[in-house]
Image: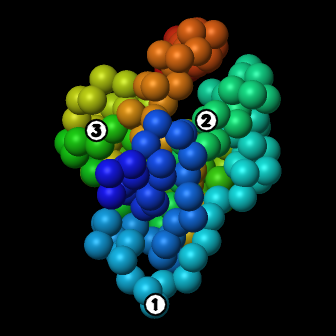
Amino acid sequence: MGRWRRTRYAYAPKGSGEVLPVVGDGFPRGPAHLDSASQPDYHVPVPSVLESLSSVPLFANLTPRQLRKVARNASEDSYAAGSSIVTEGGRTETLFVVLEGTAKIVRNGRTIARRNPGDYFGEISMIDGRRRAASVVADTPMRCLVLYHDGLRKLVMDDPGMAWSLLLTLAGRVRES
């Protein structure tokens, strides 16, 4: 394992920024399912990821090169209707981009917002590492692109232009809320 790092759903060469084929059916069950030979292999096709990312307001101002870097650091997860994606008060450092399906944002048992394809959630906890302010529950079967704190942090540290673009978009979103 020396030159490989284990991510949540894939193995990738350390420092490469690549994501190799993911093992499993897309429903998160934790790292234990990585070793199962009975699971089919699949991967996130980069062209569809690039199309999805470029249509998301958070990434709309990135260059094609920057989008490719983000895509290489993302994985795809699927959720059944009714599944809890994140839990209020929980600690996770991930950003989710909705590719298909819809979700509701729930705080103190009340639905406060909805997320549709092209929307994203989890950006604040991904940045500051604090507990989730709300739960997110899949209304319908969903596919999400998932970006992890460490991968995105490395990207913005290596590319200040990307960091600035993301900050401007996030500032606009905070201002509108």
Is residue 67 left or right of 87 when viewed as pictured? Answer: right
Task: Identify the residue at horizontal 36%, vertical 54% (top origin).
Answer: 6
Give the CA distance from mark 3 to mark 1: 34 Å
Label whose residue precedes the other's in the sequence (3 or 1): 1
Q: As displayed, is residue 124 above or below residue 83?
A: above
- Looking at the image, which residue sits at the far bottom? 38
Q: Residues within 10 Å of mark 2 (few under 14, many from 20)?
A: many
Which type of secondary structure does the marked residue at label 1 adopt? loop
Which type of secondary structure does the marked residue at label 2 adopt? helix
Please tell me in which quadrant of the rendered image residue 45 appears: bottom right
| Labels 3 and 1 touching (C-beta < 8 A) | no
Label whose residue precedes the other's in the sequence (2 or 3): 2
Q: Picture coordinates of residue 151 (x, y %)?
A: 46, 35
Task: Identify the residue at horizontal 43%, vertical 25% (top origin).
Answer: 153
Q: Hey, what amino acid is under mark 2?
A: Val
* In the foreground, 114 or 76: 76
Is residue 47 left or right of 140 when viewed as pictured? Answer: right
Residue indicated by mark 3 = 132
Please tell me in which quadrant of the rendered image residue 54 appears: top right
Q: Hey, what amino acid is under mark 1?
A: Ser
Residue indicated by mark 2 = 70
Residue indicated by mark 1 = 38
Is residue 150 among what the camera can see?
A: yes
Q: Which of marks 2 and 3 is in front?
A: 2
Q: Picture coordinates of residue 163 (x, y %)?
A: 55, 14
Q: Nearer the viewer, mark 3 or mark 1?
A: 1
Q: Residues within 10 Å of mark 3 (few under 14, many from 20)?
A: many
- Looking at the image, which residue sits at the far front? 2
* In the foreground, 82 or 80: 80
* In the foreground, 43 or 114: 43
